[in-house]
Structures are given as C-alpha cells and as structure tokens.
Image (cartoon, rainbow, N blue to C red):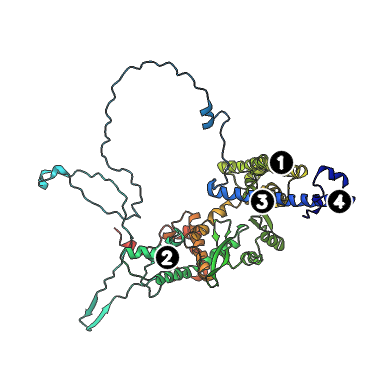
Amino acid sequence: MNPAPWSALSSLEDAATLSPQNVLDLAAAWREWEKTGAVLRQEIAGLRQQVDWFRRQLFGQKSERRIDIGSPGQMSLGEWLTQPTLPEPPSRLIAAHTRKAATQRPDDGDTVPFFDETRVPVEVIELPAPATEGLSPEDYEVVSHKESYRLAQRPGSYVVIKYRRPVVKLKASEALVCAPAPSNVIDGSRADVSFVAGLLIDQFAYHLPLYRQHQRLADAGFTVSRPWLTQIAQQGAALLEAIYEAQWASIRESRVKAMDETPIKAGQGGPGKLKRGYFWPVHGERDEICFPFFESREIKHVEAALGLTPAERAVLLSDGYHAYAHYAAKIGITHAQCWTHTRRGFFEAPAAEPEAAAEALALIGELYQVEEDIRQARLKGERKKDHRLVHAKPVVERFFAWIDERFAAQGLLPSNPLTKALAYARDRRFGLEVFLSDPDVPIDTNHLERALRVIPMGRRNWMFCWTELGARHVGILQSLIVTCRLHGINPYDYLVDVLQRIGQHPAERVHELTPRCWKALFAANPLRSPLHRQAP
C-alpha cells in the first residue's frame, strides 16, 4: 500500500487543508487496506484450522465418536475444589467383629482349557506325587489325574522335516530302489507348504516384514538368505493369482459395490525415489474384497477396475471423489454417497462454528441410531426399507432443510470449515438419500474402511513395494486374507489347503477355491501339511 496519502495527516490541523485528490487517495488506500485485511483474516482462519487439526492428531482422540459430556449434575474436578467445606457427619460406634481367615481354593486343576486341543500341540510333563517317594508301585494306586495348563513359547517356532527314505536292494534283480522325495507346492524349493503359508501370513496378516522374519530365523539357528524369502513370497503370490482373479470376477457381478482408494509407494521413480501408486479396494455384496493396483488416481482406473457391463440396478457406494460420480454417470448406474464422509466435515468444524457443527452431528447421529435399531432387530429386505422410510427419511429431510436455512442466514466465508461441510452435503444430496429406498445399500463405507486398514498398517511396517509387480502381489494376498477374516476363516489353514490344491484343481472350477466357496466345500476337511500329520 502506498503510504503517501497518510503522510498528509501528520496532525489534525492538516485535515482541513486536504485537497480533493488527497481525499480520493485516502479512500483508495483504505479500500486496499480493507482488502488486504480480509485476505489476512482468511489466511489466519485457515492457519488456525490447520493448527487445530495437527493438535488433534497429536493430542486429541483419534476416533470420530462424539464424547458424552455427562449429566449436568456431574461435578468437574474444578467444581469440587471450589465447593464450600461441609461439616463432617456425626460418627457412631460399630461393634467390633472377628474376620475369618481366607481359605485357599483347593487345587482341582483346570477343568476348561483355554485352547483348542485338536489344533494346538501339547507337551505333557508328568509330576510325581511327593507322598509316593520311596514307595514301590505295589504300595499305592493312581486313581486319576488333575491337569493344569500353562501357555509356553519356544523362540522361533520353526521345524525341519527330515524325510528318511530307505534305499532297498531287491535280491531278485539286484536293483536299488528308493521312494521319491515328496512333491512340494514350489518345485525344487526347500520350503514346505506350512512355511510358505506361515511366511505369507506373518508378512501380510501380522505385518512382519521379511527382514524381521529373516532375523527371527537366524536367531532360531537357520541360515537362509533374504532373497530366498523374497522369492518364496513372490512364488506363493503367483500361485494364488488365479484364485484372486476368480474372486475379482465374483465381485464384479455384485449389484451393490463399495469402492475407495488408498496410496502406496511402488516402483522406482528415479534415483532414491519411489513412485506413488494406489490400491482401489472394491467390496462386493457377498462379503468379498479385492485390492487391484493402479499407478495413479486417475478417473480411467475406476472404469478399468469395474468394467463397462454392470449388473442390473447396479449401485456404486463411495466417498465424494469425483471419479466415482463420473463413472456412474457414464455407465448409467446409481451412485450412493457415504454419510461418514459427510459427517467428517462437520466433525472438523466445531473450532469455527461449535453450535452449528453440534447440531449437524446430532442430526446425523439420529440416522445412525436408526441403523443400530435395524441391526438389533435384524431387519432385512422390505422390512428394513420400511423402517428407514418411517424413521430415517424424516431426519434426512430435516437435515437438508437445516442446511438450506444455514446457507440463507449465514455470512461465512467460503473457506470456513462449516461452509465447506454444508456445501459438501448439499451437493451430494441425491447420493446420500439412496440408502433410504434400497435396503441393500449401507449408510456408509465403514465396512470397506475397516477392511482396507491392512494397507495403512502395512505401510507402517514394510513401508513400500520395490516394484509394481510387488504391489500387485500385495493386493492378491491381502484380498484373500481379508476375505478370510470376513468369513470367519483361519487364513493359515486356508492358504495351506489351497496352495496344495491349486495345482490339481480344474481351471474351470477355480472359483471353488475362493474363501467364500472354500468355506462351504473344503473347510470341514482341509488339506494339511506333513508337519500337522506328524503332530502329537
């Protein structure tokens, strides 16, 4: 701003001598000052919002649950300190009594074990009775046993299977014969199927990177190389790729699908740099999920993932990213929006507009209470739809009427967090109302958000993938393991079975090996490793 006009007002007496040009210059300077001040106030408000966000990430609660403040009659610590001191109530004498000594519970052993004896190896340690010391067996009789259990651990619970194959000389023909070595799921490998499955489960289910597994093997007395472990993981994922493709085909056939995206570093982007890619997880209506990998977040990848031939009356449930709306409009399917992502904007707005944000959160909370009532009553189909129309639809109408009132009455800046939350919800009203008329559409994408947590958790452990092929292998393994979790299947038992079965199963029936179908066909009698057959 030009300071020249202000120099003319060095004293009050000088104001009377201002020329018309000085007055015009002062007015222009004032308008420029006001404009600069508005910009600075807007920047300060944005910076305050960022500071509040970072403070909440570091010191605040991580979940988006609303905390119940409690009843108005509940005092705080400060209120208690400021309360006047009350007189002590009158005391009265209580007759003395004699307390009995606590009796120790008899050692009857553990009647209910805390484990599944059919799956857990148990080593029995016999403890002699002290009273029988020095007596011959004829002097006492064992009438029963009491059993107690302790959970123990061996460091690095790895086992080497040693196959002893006799070399036999047939006297009639003088020929030497020997049984062939057992076949393995990976040709020519030293890794048993139990080791392959355990390696994959440790890495992708429990997020234990290969270098840590390598350290554990070394501590347990095994000398193997890190590249060998990487090859085992790659070859195991390659064996399971056909099952992944069959599950992906099943998800594409779903009428209602939920989709999201999450970043991952994969592939060399230059010296010392990795490229940024994305998993695009898709959840089908049969409780199956797949993690296809694409190199970017471009709109075309939604079409490449879901295809151009959707099911009849197909619905795509997602957040507010415009790529999903573009795909839905192009293909001609219904696009449903997530209420959790809508709520998130109001959850982050209390610092700017606490009363309005609390009102919005209360209205959305009523919708979730309706969904909780539906879950408690186990309503399905038309009964679920009718319940939503009776109880949830009026709340939705009140919510959007309240949004219109706020827009009509407020004078908030476009950068205000509440303004952004209001605009986000109003622009997506049609998608947010889809769940009211379709009982198969969830109110949010929380089921997908829970399932894709394995990717952010993995990023904190193995951090990145060296190649795009490695990222695809991560997607294959996580697709099958997470789907196993959704169907209540032990992923280790599943992998041990299908790794042995995939090589001999008919290709046209590979869908039978997806976790959903496998549970019905093979879970009752799965294939085990030789180590399991030798267990006591």
Instruction: Using the image, tell me which numbered label, if any, was put on residue 46.
Output: 3
Cα distance between the residues tagged 1 and 2: 54 Å
* Labels 2 & 3 near each other (Cβ < 8 A): no
Cα distance between the residues tagged 2 and 3: 43 Å
The mark closer to the camera, 2 or 3, is: 3
Give the residue type at disc 3: Gly
Which circle's residue, 1 or 2, is located before the other in the chain?
2
**Neighbour class for label 2 at 10 Å: few (<14), some, many (≥20)?**
some
Q: Position of residue 517 (x, y in %)?
A: 50, 60
Which circle's residue, 2 or 4, is located before the other in the chain?
4
The mark closer to the camera, 1 or 2, is: 2
The vertical placement of 87 against 272, above or below, is: above
Instruction: Using the image, tell me which numbered label, if any, was put on residue 22.
Output: 4
Which circle's residue, 1 or 3, is located before the other in the chain?
3
* Labels 1 & 4 near each other (Cβ < 8 A): no
Give the residue type at disc 4: Asn
Query: To which residue does mark 1 refer?
Result: 398
Which circle's residue, 2 or 3, is located before the other in the chain?
3
Q: Position of residue 365 (x, y in %)?
A: 62, 42
**Neighbour class for label 3 at 10 Å: few (<14), some, many (≥20)?**
some
Give the residue type at disc 1: Arg
Q: Is residue 253 visible?
A: yes
Cα distance between the residues tagged 1 and 3: 30 Å
Give the residue type at disc 2: Leu
The mark closer to the camera, 1 or 4, is: 4
Q: Label 4's element?
A: helix
Query: To which residue does mark 2 refer?
Result: 210
The quadrant holding residue 119 is bottom left
